[in-house]
Amino acid sequence: MIADVLSDATARMKKAVEVAKDDFGTVRTGRANPQLFQKIMVSYYGTPTPLAQLASLQNPEARTLLVTPYDKGALRDIEQAIRDTPNLGANPSNDGNIIRVTLPELTEERRKEYVKIVRGKAEDAKVSVRNIRRKAKDDLDSLKGEVGDDEVSRAEKELEQITKANVDSIDDALKRKEAELLEV
C-alpha cells in the first residue's frame, strides 16, 4: 500500500519535471531551435493542430528556421500561427513552398524578460510537485489505521526526500536555462 502511494507520487513528480523542462525549451534563446515551435497550435481546417504534425522543421543557420508543410494548403495558416505566437518575435516569410523564420537578435532587456518567464514556469512546476506531495501525504495519512504509525512516518520522510530531489531537479534545469538565456 505505502509502496504504491510512493511509486505513484514519484512517477507523477517525474512527469511534472519533464513538463517543466519541455516548457523551458519553448522559451527562445539567441538561437533558432525547432523545439521553440513544437507547441505552436495551427488552425488546420478549423481544428487546432500542433505545428510539428503539419510540417517538418529544419535549422540551417543559427537564427533561421525552415518550416516545410506537408500540405501546401496549410502554408498561410502556419505562417499566421507563427506570427501570432507571443514571446517569439519572429517574422515568417513564405515563398509558396516553405516558410523561412528569422529570429531577431535578443536585447539585454528581452533576455531578462525571458528569464522572468522561465522562473514563473519553474515556480508553476514546483507548485505542481508540492501538490502531488500533498495528495500522497493525505493518502499516507488515510493508511494510518491499516499500517503502523512508524511505517507511515518513514514513508513521509521518504516522500519528502523524493519531493526535494524533484524540486532540486527543476532548480538545476532553471539554472541551466537562465545561463543559456543570459549568454550573449
Image (cartoon, helix red, strand yellow):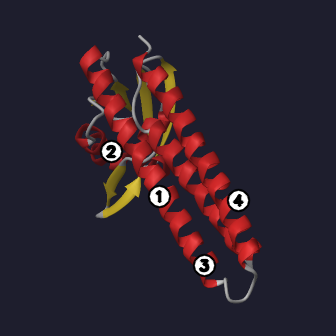
Instruction: Measuring from the top left, give residue 89's x and y in whole percent.
Output: 26, 29
Residue extending furthest toward the bottom: 145
Q: Which residue is mark 3?
A: 141
Cβ atoms at labels 3 and 1 below 8 Å apart = no
Look at discs 3 and 1 and give the one toward the viewer.
Answer: 3
Give the alpha-carbon distance from disc 3 to disc 1, as whole Å: 20 Å
- Of the residues shown, which amino acid type is indicated by label 2? Ile
Which mark is on residue 40? none
Give the alpha-carbon distance from disc 1 to disc 4, as whole Å: 18 Å
Instruction: Measuring from the top left, give residue 167's x and y in whole percent.
Output: 55, 46
Question: Which quadrant of the figure contains the N terminus?
Answer: bottom right
Q: Which residue is mark 1?
A: 128
Residue extending furthest toward the top: 184
Give the alpha-carbon distance from disc 3 to disc 2, as whole Å: 50 Å
Cβ atoms at labels 3 and 4 below 8 Å apart = no
Q: Residue at x 68, y 73 (%)?
A: 5
In this view, 26 is above or below 107: below
Which of the 4 image quadrants contains residue 97? top left
- Of the residues shown, which amino acid type is indicated by label 3? Asp
- Of the residues shown, which amino acid type is indicated by label 4? Glu
Q: Which residue is mark 2?
A: 78
The front one of 154 and 33 is 154
Q: Which residue is mark 4?
A: 158
Give the alpha-carbon distance from disc 2 to disc 4, as whole Å: 47 Å
In this view, 69 is above or below 140: above
Instruction: Measuring from the top left, give residue 81's x and y in whole percent.
Output: 28, 45
Q: Residue at x 32, y 15 (%)?
A: 105
